[in-house]
Image: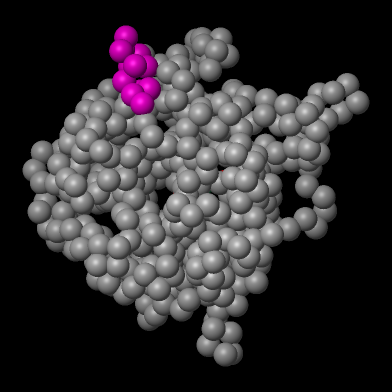
Amino acid sequence: MDKNFIWGAGTSAYQIEGAFNEDGRSPSIWDTFSHTPGKIERKHTGDVACDHYHRYKEDVKLLAELGVKAYRFSISWSRILPNGIGEINEKGLAFYDHLLDELSQYHIEPFVTLYHWDLPQILFEKGGWLNPQIPSWFEYYVDVVTKHFGKRVRNYITINEPQIVVQVGMHSLEHAPGIIYSTRECLQASHHILLAHGLAVRKIRKNVPDALIGFAPCSDSVVPLHNDPASVEEARKLFFQLRKDNFHVVTLFSDPVFLGDYPKEYYEMYKDVLPKMGKDDLKIISTPIDYCYQNVYTGAYCDVDASGKGYIKDFPVGSPQSNIVWEDVVPETNYWTPKFLYERYHKPIFIGENGMCCHDAVSKDGKVHDPNRVDFMDRYLTELKKVQKDGIPVVGYFAWSLLDNFEWAWGYTKRFGIVYVDFTTQKRIQKDSYYFYRETIKNQGENLR
Ligand code: PNW
């Protein structure tokens, strides 16, 4: 990897902080959801999570020993503004101040995600992402946070995975708030999310003139099974294609942000259910940003039939899988996803999240051996190195995740960490993948081949 490459690791507030009712924090939709029987595997909640709120010093030390230059974490909106808007909770800000102090001691650059799914419950009760006022509520929250941090934080990520917020939170029962909304409502919520993003970008620019800003979508990536021009073209087409009632598609959010408009087919496909839009909305939404962050986990292989048409090929029986249903191991996604995105949006790329869910346990020797995750990181990072060599400006990578944590609807039953967490004792144990990543960072990816 080139010498300025930014090696990082990531987490999010609800998944690690715990201290759910301490120091003035109000509930978010994830508190309500996880306290509702039947929603989360084994009745797990984020009440304690990794107890990071009290153990952040130990966790920052783990980052420092890992050798990362960057730490991506998110801010809990309801810690800062218990009423969603209005009165500021100084104790909430103080927690993040202490975290920033700790990071700066080790020269680790903070990359702050402003929204990682934990909407204040009180705002949900006012309609949440469906209320036309929510873009300005978010703008207010972002104003408070960015003014407060000032020069101490330069890198911001506005919203994490708008796709999952809508598809899994508002179009399925799986994530909070867990209500199935109509297509019209989902499109309206998506539009409000985009507008919230755009207003946030403008606020950040005003408060922190030299800020570097991105947002972190996810996508259903498609990669060509064979590297010939026809297959590549078909994969690209399938990757960017809108599919009706599917809010996972990357272009649904990234086209308005980077290209200033929804894809052409959008207006035809959804002509009866289009969201209400103000006349300047798209201009606000496409306020220029600096980076395209992309969370990359898996992908689908595309093959080409006899007539030259692309189709999604089933995975061969027995192909490598992670320990979570949606994550097949597809290392080439770390090559083609940044390449396709750069060619369409012309923005430098960060891999905002990448990692593997494994069935980890402490061995008799007291260590946590995770050969599948080591192999995953090796293969995925090798593909990333390849795409960088081919001229695509991939500027950084965030391993997901620093810690095993509250994996949303799966509770603590699914582990993505490169550090193992014993959720009874809160003991942290570095896994083999942590040491592999540390080695890779130390030699700047020389070992990747
Ligand atoms: C991301 N999918 O979620 C989130 O940003 C993290 O908070 C989460 O822990 C991590 O990935 C692992 O799940 C995703 O269905 C959820 O493709 C679902 C999908 C992808 C990412």
Q: Is residue 272 left or right of residue 299?
A: left
| Residue furthest out toward the right | 306
Question: Residue 448: x, y in percent?
Answer: 64, 61
Q: Residue at x 65, y 71 (%)?
A: 371
Classify residue 186 by image quadrant: top left
Question: Residue 18: x, y in percent?
Answer: 30, 64
| Residue furthest out toward the front | 3
- Any magenta on residue 279? yes
Question: Residue 397: x, y in percent?
Answer: 49, 52
Q: Residue at x 25, y 49 (%)?
A: 153
Q: Residue at x 29, y 67 (%)?
A: 106
Identify which residue, 200 or 245, lies in the foreground.
Answer: 200
Is 58 drawn above or below residue 300 in the view shown? below
The colour scheme is one colour
State whether residue 414 appears in this view.
no
Classify residue 156 by image quadrant: top left
Q: Quadrant of the C terminus?
A: bottom right
Is 6 drawn above or below residue 272 in the view shown? below
Q: Which residues are magenta?
A: 277-288
State whether residue 167 appears in this view.
yes
Q: Quadrant of the N terminus?
A: bottom right
- Any magenta on residue 218? no
Q: Is residue 280 left or right of residue 260?
A: left
Q: How many marks?
A: 0
Is 418 drawn above or below residue 154 in the view shown? below
Question: Residue 281: x, y in percent?
Answer: 33, 16
Identify which residue, 72 or 318, lies in the foreground.
Answer: 72
Q: Residue at x 54, y 83 (%)?
A: 367
